[in-house]
Structures are given as C-alpha cells and as structure tokens.
Amino acid sequence: MNTYIALLRGINVGGHKKIPMAELRLLLEKKGLRNVKTYIQSGNVVFQSPSQDKTEIEELIKKLILDHFGFEVPVLVKTHSELKTIINACPFLEDEKIKSYFFLLQSLPNKENVEEASEKQYEGEDYKILNDCIYYYCNKGYGQAKFNMSLFERKLETNATSRNYRTMVKLIEMSATQ
C-alpha cells in the first residue's frame, strides 16, 4: 500500500461546499482507500491506496465528492516525500518559514510562465516559485495580503491549493506513521 495526502480546495469555507470529515472518511473507505485520516475541516486527507497513479486517485476522489455531495472540488494528491521535499526547499529563513504559506501546484509550470508571474511584486510580501510550489510570506499576515492565488493560477496555467506551515508539518507527520 502507498501512502498519500489528498488536499481538497475550497471546502467548508464560509458555509460553502460543506463536507463533514467523518462522512468523507467513510466514503473514501467504502471505495477501497485504507487507514483514512483527516486533519482539520479544510480538506486534508491522509490514506493508503494500492494505486500508484496519483491522477487516478485525484479523479476518484473528485468523482466520489461530486456524486455524493453534489459539487465539484479540485483535488491534489501528494506523497509524504513530496511534501517533505516542498517544505525542506522553502527559501525563507526559519522565522519566516514558520509563518509562510505553501501554494501547491497541480502541475509543473513552464519556465516562461514562471518568469512572467515572478515579475509581480507586493510591498511587505515575498514569494518564490520553485518547481510545483509557490512559497509565500507576508509580514502583515495572509489576511492582509494583496497576493491573489487566482491570478497566479491563470499566469502559471495550473490549479493550486494552499496550506500554512503548521498544516504542512502535521500532514508530513501523519503520513509518516502510515
């Protein structure tokens, strides 16, 4: 069995796209995923699957959610080692790193799109696009940020979902014990 982390985007935010985590765990287990665990209500699922095809797993989870809950949700699946690599590659100093956000990209953007997206600068905000992640730090906090993930998704031509440092560390910890 292979261990994976599924990151669901935009659920349980402001009363929209509500997915109870206990119900999601049962739904995934009924379709053959094992040792399904969730972390907080924002759509973080650690599980095991015999499949080695992450795209196949993403499609399975998306279809299950659409069929059961009646709405579409973008799903990104990563492995334990991929999350560890992402967090270890964070270009910020340790005190900034623990206050950072990680925008995990669905696919690797092309070099030209990265260069174009990297031209955008915001005062008091710093970001770096490395491989399949945008590392983002704002000294005022994300709630006060001008950074717009949708703009970067368009420029990079890929979907993304974000997690803060604490959530990334917890998901790495949870997936290591599977």
Image (cartoon, helix red, strand yellow):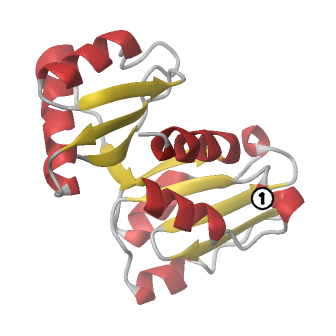
Q: Amino acid type of disc 1?
A: Lys
59, 74: nearer the viewer? 59
- Is any part of residue 20 visible from this angle? no
Residue placed under numbered mark 1 in the picture: 97
90, 143: nearer the viewer? 90
Query: Is 98 situated left or right of 163 in this image?
Result: right
Q: Secondary structure at mark 1?
A: helix
Residue at 25 percent across and 14 percent down: it is 26
Q: Indicate the position of residue 11 as horizontal and vertical percent values.
A: 41, 26
On the image, which quarter does residue 61 sit in?
A: top left
55, 51: nearer the viewer? 51
Q: Quadrant of the C terminus?
A: top left
Q: Is residue 158 above or below residue 91?
A: above
Q: Is residue 20 above or below residue 97?
A: above
On the image, which quarter does residue 27 sit in?
A: top left
Count all numbered tags in the image, as a single digit: 1
Q: Is residue 8 above or below residue 100?
A: above
Q: Indicate the position of residue 109 as horizontal and vertical percent values.
A: 38, 76
Residue at 44 percent across and 25 percent down: it is 38
Q: Indicate the position of residue 57 as horizontal and vertical percent values.
A: 18, 45
Query: Is 7 situated left or right of 42 in this image?
Result: left
- Is any part of residue 65 visible from this angle? yes
Q: Indicate the position of residue 85 as horizontal and vertical percent values.
A: 54, 67
Q: Residues within 10 Å of mark 1 (few under 14, many from 20)?
A: some
